[in-house]
Amino acid sequence: MHRFNPDNRHRLLSEQRYALLPPDRVLDLLPLRPEMTVGDIGCGPGFFTLPLAERLTAGRVFAADIEPVMLQMVGERAGAAGLTNIQTILTEEAAIPLDAASLDAALLALVYHEVGDRIGYLSLLARLVRPGGWLALIEWERRENPIGGPPLAARIPPAEATTELATTGWRVTAQHPLNDWMYMLVAEQIP
């Protein structure tokens, strides 16, 4: 398991990252509706949180992370942007303090490889997302690249993530290559 060092948090908002993974282009691939409640799980400094909040004009975003410094950055950035529909939530490795079925959807962007018990974590997300809801999982392809990312051994290929999702009650409905080094799976809860 590889863990991102929060001391490098400003790299998560770099121009290079925005060019590589444009939030609007990624969010266009999701079945978002303005009234949804979406959990940005492992939100970091809010790379996707703020663009989500802008789209969810009648909804809200729960920005969840285990690092208080990341949540502080989300709060500061949301305040500066005038976004009032973001609520930050401090999590633990295997616990997210939200009620069951409280989310219409969840986004897990470039953090799945950091989870120790991935099956347990996907099961937790299945409890938090209402029946019929969806999960978007963005991860690194298992190949070398010039831009960094976790060690190759920590990366989870799409087929492996798809199998783990199926094991925990999710069905992959779409797979999108986001660039040469990252992919996104969109999965719905199996009724």
Image (cartoon, rainbow, N blue to C red):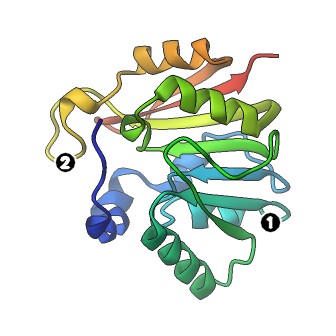
Could you tell me which residue is drawn at 67 percent across and 84 percent down?
A: 82
Q: Position of residue 181 (x, y in %)?
A: 29, 36
Q: Amino acid at mark 2?
A: Gly
Could you tell me which residue is drawn at 81 percent across and 56 percent down?
A: 34
2 and 1 marks in contact (CB < 8 Å)? no
Residue 186 in sight: no
- Residue to which mark 2 is pinned: 148
Q: Rate crowding at label 2 as few (under 14), some (14 to 19) or many (20 or more) other CA atoms within 10 Å.
A: few
How much space separates mark 2 and mark 1, taking CA atoms? 34 Å
Image quadrant assignment for residue 6: bottom left
Q: What kind of element bears circle 1?
A: loop
Up-down: is 149 above or below 115? below
Q: Amino acid at mark 1?
A: Thr
Q: Position of residue 18 (x, y in %)?
A: 38, 60
Could you tell me which residue is drawn at 82 percent across and 39 percent down?
A: 101
Q: What kind of element bears circle 2?
A: loop
- Residue to which mark 1 is pinned: 57
